[in-house]
Image: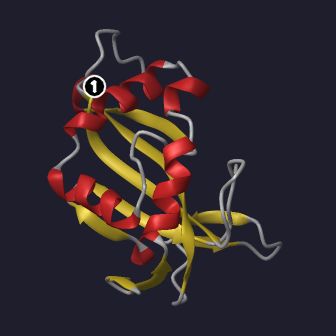
Amino acid sequence: MITLGKIRLEIEPERTRRFYQSARPLTEGCSCDGCVNYAAGISRLPREVTAFFARLGIDPAKPAEIMTWYAEDDGKSVFYGGFYHLCGKMLSDSDCWEYNAEGNCGHVNEDKLFAVTENFSVGFTNAVALPEDGLPEPVLQMEIFVHHAPWVIPQPNTY
């Protein structure tokens, strides 16, 4: 069991790690500047973030989805959202998404996020989007929220 603030998870890091050994890197599925920049910036993640990914068995270079929301710091950085999949389940009522009356995803409940660092937060949900082939069950989705991710590629930041 892993406890992250109010979030309690039952995670299988070794099964997750084995899955990520054969998962495709981000830039195999997308070559937009935002995804290319995210992939190029992986090596610059703070040590706390890389240790966090390692603890869960996730390869940070292989997200299921990355979204570049907008530029920050006059274009020197961006705000990213996205998600990764891992083997496990939530043990607490900590779904980071608020749902509307129809059961559709509404918005993120910031009270149910865990700050890995000042600029890198995560939340978890059982609602899995874009599951990869071969992902063993049970599956949990880890949402990420990354502020001030540096723009490291030579192309101008157009976000």
In this rendering, is residue 113 above or below 63? below
Name the quadrant of the N terminus.
bottom left
Residue at mark 1: 151
Task: Kindly give the residue lying farthest to the top in the view shown.
Answer: 155
Residue name at image x 51 percent, y 70 percent: 124
**For numbered disc 1, what is the local secondary structure?**
loop
Task: Give the tally of numbered discs.
Answer: 1
Residue name at image x 41 percent, y 17 percent: 158
Q: Position of residue 87 (x, y in %)?
A: 56, 68
**Displayed quadrant of residue 56:** bottom left
Q: Position of residue 2 (x, y in %)?
A: 37, 82
Front-lying residue, 60 or 37:
60
In this rendering, is residue 131 above or below 69? below
Q: Position of residue 115 (x, y in %)?
A: 28, 67
Q: Is residue 19 left or right of residue 7?
A: right
Residue name at image x 41 percent, y 39 percent: 61
Say which amino acid is labelled 1: Trp
Front-lying residue, 16 or 4:
16
Q: Is residue 102 left or right of residue 124?
A: right
In this rendering, is residue 126 above or below 26? below
In this rendering, is residue 51 above or below 41? below
Residue name at image x 72 percent, y 48 percent: 133
**Displayed quadrant of residue 93:** bottom right
Task: Kindly give the residue lying farthest to the bottom in the view shown.
Answer: 92
**Displayed quadrant of residue 122:** bottom left
Q: Is residue 17 left or right of residue 88?
A: left
Q: Is residue 55 left or right of residue 44?
A: right
Mark 1 crowd level (few <14, some 14–19, many ≥20, 10 Å Cα) = many
Name the quadrant of the C terminus.
top left
Task: Kindly give the residue lying farthest to the left in the view shown.
Answer: 47
Q: Identify the colour scheme used.
A: secondary structure
Q: Position of residue 60 (x, y in %)?
A: 39, 46
